[in-house]
Image (cartoon, rainbow, N blue to C red):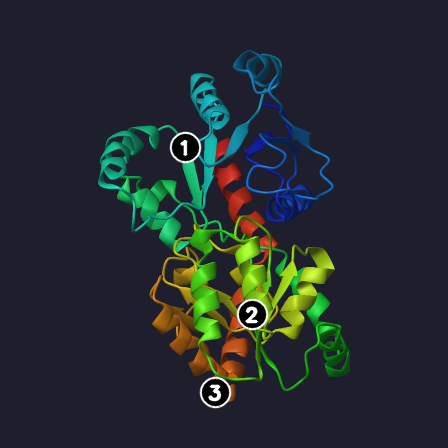
Amino acid sequence: MSDLPKIIMVCIEPTPYVLDLIRALEKKWRGKIDVLFINENFTQQWHIDNQHKILDKKTRRFTYLFKHYFNNKKYDAIFLAGWNHPTILFFLIMAKLYRIPVIVDSDTSLFRYTPFWKQVIKKCIYPILFKLPNHFLPSGTRQAQYLKHYLVPDHKITLEKMTVNVLGIQNYIQQFSDDARKKLRDQWRMTNNDFVFLFVGRLITRKGIEDLINAFSSIKNINIKCIIAGDGPLKTRVEIAAKNDQRLIYAGWLENKALLDLYLISDVFVLPAHWEPWGLVINEALAAGKPVIVSDQVGCVDDLVISGKTGIVFPAKNVTALKEAMIGILDDAKKREIYSKNAYQLIGQWTLQDSADQIMGVWERLIYDV
């Protein structure tokens, strides 16, 4: 092993969160980090400046991967994002053959509606598969429970604290005065008297888009607005709903400062997902000091959404409960103020630096056997 330890990170795609985390690691890690992405756009089209290697059909071949990452190079540890992709499985198996420590990052949590046959297969295969990695870095509490469900022992688990650029979001939000916030609202044809709910994410069924539209539309209050930002198969459904209800605004796909502006002008963030592995938009909303309304099937609820303190948790797929939660927080300004302060304090313990420290601590223990 060289004096300066060398790590390779194999990730699925260059999302904003992943690139921000890599930058945080590169600033603090005393060694070399190689980064490899399996796809450029796996879950959606990312318009991101990425300087790291992205595989294609040719470079995803196992012969190529062996030649370039095992035959000629020596890594002191391998960091893998998940375990389901064939390329990641290849790295996992080869690492065990070469006796290179493997750390697996995971945002997977137990899904309430998993078919029985899938449960049986996973119960047979995963306890065997999960013996291969040296250590796991689950995003949070629910993700750690998932690993324990498949018999991963406690000593092989360290919570990663999955998060976003919390400090960057907070600094951006803090620079705006009340007057500047009002001007931004004017651009969206809103007044200071409007109460604004916000949803950000892919427009797909499991995000609970239909539930949000139905719950919001049934609230008879002319001074409320609901902004839906994102893109996906349900775009037309959202556009029709916005046409039929002028209080509902479809913002389209936004990113960077334009997206942060939506957090700034909103009052409450809503994520009514039927299932969500983690939900980084909740990290973003809390960093912006926003109370949240979240279904109980969102993976971060055990860590970030403390019911009665930072937001409200309701049963997934229950439109009536979602509507009641929205009305409850709409009618209680004091509660919103308390939630906002608590949200800001809690997310301050979930920074990229905290996440990087957790990850590097595991790297060091495995490389130096401490």
Q: Earlier in the sequence, mark 2 or mark 3?
A: 2
- Residue 57 shows up from this direction: yes
Q: Which mark is residue 332?
A: 3
Q: Residues within 10 Å of mark 2 (few under 14, many from 20)?
A: few
Q: Earlier in the sequence, mark 3 or mark 1?
A: 1
Question: In front: 57, or 230?
Answer: 230
Mark 2 sits on what residue?
244
The residue sitting at 37% across, 68% down in the picture is 319
Label 1 is placed on what type of residue?
Answer: Asn
- The Cα atoms of the two marked residues, 2 and 3, are separated by 28 Å
Is residue 272 found left or right of 47 in the rendered image?
A: left
Of 318 and 173, nearer the camera is 318
| Dot 3 crowding, Cα within 10 Å, few <14, some 14–19, many 20+ | few
Q: Tell me the CA gap for discs 2 and 1.
A: 54 Å
Query: Quadrant where the N terminus lies?
Result: top right
| Residue 370 appears in view | no
**Would you say 240 lies left or right of 293 here?**
right
Coordinates of residue 31 in the picture (x, y in percent): 65, 34
Q: Quadrant of residue 297?
A: bottom left
Left of 344 or right of it: where is 101?
Answer: left
Q: Residue 73: image x %, image y %?
A: 61, 18
